Structures are given as C-alpha cells and as structure tokens.
Amino acid sequence: MARRERTTGLPRPRPRQGSHQERKVAGIAVTEQTTRIAILGGAAVLLVLVLGLLGWRWYDQNYRVPDKVILRVGEEQFTLKYYADRLFPYAQSQTGAGVSLGLAEQALVGVLEEEALVALIAREKGITVTEQDITNEIAAQLGVPAGGAGSSFDTLYRQRLKSLTMTDGNYRRQVEAQVYRTRLIEGYKAEMGETSEMVTLRAISVAAKEEADAILERIRGGEDMGTVAQTTSNDLTSRQKDGVLDPEPPRLYPESVQAAIEGKEAGPELFGPIEVAGNFWVFRLEKRDPNATPSDTQKNQLAELMLKDDLTAKRASVTIRRSLTASDITWAEKNAD
C-alpha cells in the first residue's frame, strides 16, 4: 500500500517586500562596492583639482606673469621679468638720490620707453650695435679686457650679475641701450662740428622781483652795472667778475633768456627782470660770437638737447602702450631681489 506524504497545511513564509531589492540612484545600483568606488573617485577628482590649481599657480607665477608684456614701443616689447630685473639696481640709484620707491617704480617704465626710442632713432641714423660691442662695453665698465671662461672678465661679470640679480640676457639688453645712447650722442656732437655760436652775458641775480626792478632802475639811472653786480648779485661766481658770465651757447640758457636775446646784437640794452631757476635776472648782452669753440661739457649738453628734440618727434610718431598694473609691481618687488 502506497505511503501518503503528510503535509502540515501551514503556509510558507513569503519574502519581505524589498528585502532583496537593491537601491538605485540615477539608474545605478548602490551597493557597498559602488559606494567605495564613488568615494575613491571623488577623492581622485578632488586631488586632480588641487594639483591642477597648484600647477596653474606655478605656471602663472613662473611663466604667464613674468612673460606679460608691460610696455610696447613700436615693435619693441618689455616683459614684466625684464622690468623686475631692472627694478632692483634702478630703485637703489633713485632712492639713494631721495626718490621714493613708488616714484622709482613708475619712472622705470619711462626709462625703458626712452631706451627703446633711442634705439629706434639710432638705427634710423645708421648706427648699429653688435654682440661684440656689448661685450666690449661690459668689459670697459668692469675695467678688464674681454675674455672667455675662467678669465678676469668672466669672474667679475658673474659677480656683477649676482650682485644685480639679473640674467645675462637682460643685462646685455640694458648695456645695448647704453651703447646706442652713447653712439647717438657722439653722432650729434659730430654733426655740430668744432665751433658753435656763443654769447656772453653780464647778469645780476636776486631772489625777489621787486629787488630786480629796483636794480634795473638804478642801472638806468646811471649806476655802473658791474659795481651793482659786485654788491647785490647772489651768484657768487659771476659777481666776482662784475656779473660777467662765461660764454655759453644760447641754446643752453632758459627759453625766456633765449627769447629775450634772439636776433639782438651786443650793446647797452638791458633785459629783465626775467625769472631764472627761482631767481630774477637783470642782464645785458655783452658779446655774440658765431664761431666760438664750446667745451666738451657744452657739446654734451647741446647733444642731449638734440636728442631730446628727436625723442619728442619720435614719441609722437610711434605707438606706445603701457600696461603695468599694481599687481605687476607687487610681483616685480617680490622677484626683484
């Protein structure tokens, strides 16, 4: 007889709703493994961002910022790094003369601008400067002959670069500008020749206009101008010579004096009072010599005035753009020493 299976008749337990269902976020199952991967992935992304920011900051401070062009003069460009290299020695020379650091920082841009303009003018006049010319000028400034590795020149030049905290390329660029200016000045002196017009004035210099007016009336009234100069002029050098000044090219006098004597011959006519360097002059044209020989100092002064004229003309014809900001100056200060 077959054996029948017994059943208890009890209901089987049903699985709890959702006990074996996985949670999903954006269609992705959230498990312990995926959670761990997400945390690691987030950390990796954060690390990449941090490294990226650090890398960008390093690039910004070492390449992008230093290579920023802060001045353009025609085709010539000056970077912030070059400005920073020039700042330390220039600021030292200016602060020693009583100029504040802030004014020196702004003035340096003008110095670089003028150097570029001088080079443009010189090249237009056919003046060239070679690498050997630059080396020779550096050697002359160091007081030794130019030489290679291991020479006195090499040793002193390395010391000079270290003391100025400048790169070789930037220092040579600075010296190149100096050579251009020197040769341009020599060119102007050659243009003016050996002789030049010179005038001799007899002048009385006093501090107040009222005093000068009174002196003018005394001389017109018959008093000897030389005697008055001996007793009243505050120019101690000329008063010992009855007020007679050393012969001078007219161009070297202030414009007000130049205008007064322009086209005038030597004679008894009195001029003034005219303000000159904070004083008031009463003067007379004693002599006009069209073929006098100026001194080397006077030639250099006249050449500088000729350069000034050319700089004014060139500045008006060349595109100049400055873009030095306060943050640029801050960077330059930190990297100038």
Image: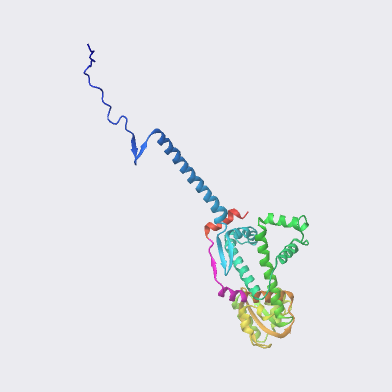
Q: Is residue 272 left or right of residue 243?
A: left
Taking the spot 68% from the left edge, 84% from the top edge, the residue there is: 285
Q: Is residue 34 above or below residue 304?
A: above
Q: Quadrant of residue 96?
A: bottom right
Give x and y (percent) for residue 224. Answer: 70, 84
Answer whether residue 318 is magenta in the image.
Answer: yes
Give x and y (percent) for residue 170. Answer: 65, 60
Q: Is residue 165 above or below residue 18?
A: below
Q: Is residue 130 above or below residue 51?
A: below
Q: Is residue 242 above or below residue 29?
A: below
Q: Quadrant of the C terminus?
A: bottom right
- Check the image and tell me how it is coloured: rainbow
Give x and y (percent) for residue 87. Answer: 62, 59
* Residue 148 seen from this side: yes
Q: Nearer the viewer, residue 205 or 117?
A: 117
Q: Quadrant of the N terminus?
A: top left
Taking the spot 66% from the left edge, 63% from the top edge, the residue there is: 174
Total count of labels: 0
Residue at the outermost top position: 1
Answer whether residue 25 is magenta in the image.
Answer: no
* Residue 276 seen from this side: no
Q: Quadrant of residue 225?
A: bottom right
Q: Quadrant of residue 155?
A: bottom right
Q: Nearer the viewer, residue 63 or 302?
A: 63
Residue at the outermost front position: 1
Q: Which residues are magenta?
A: 309-324
Q: Nearer the viewer, residue 252 or 236?
A: 252
Give x and y (percent) for residue 33. Answer: 41, 34
Taking the spot 58% from the left edge, 68% from the top edge, the residue there is: 75
Q: Is residue 54 left or right of residue 307?
A: left
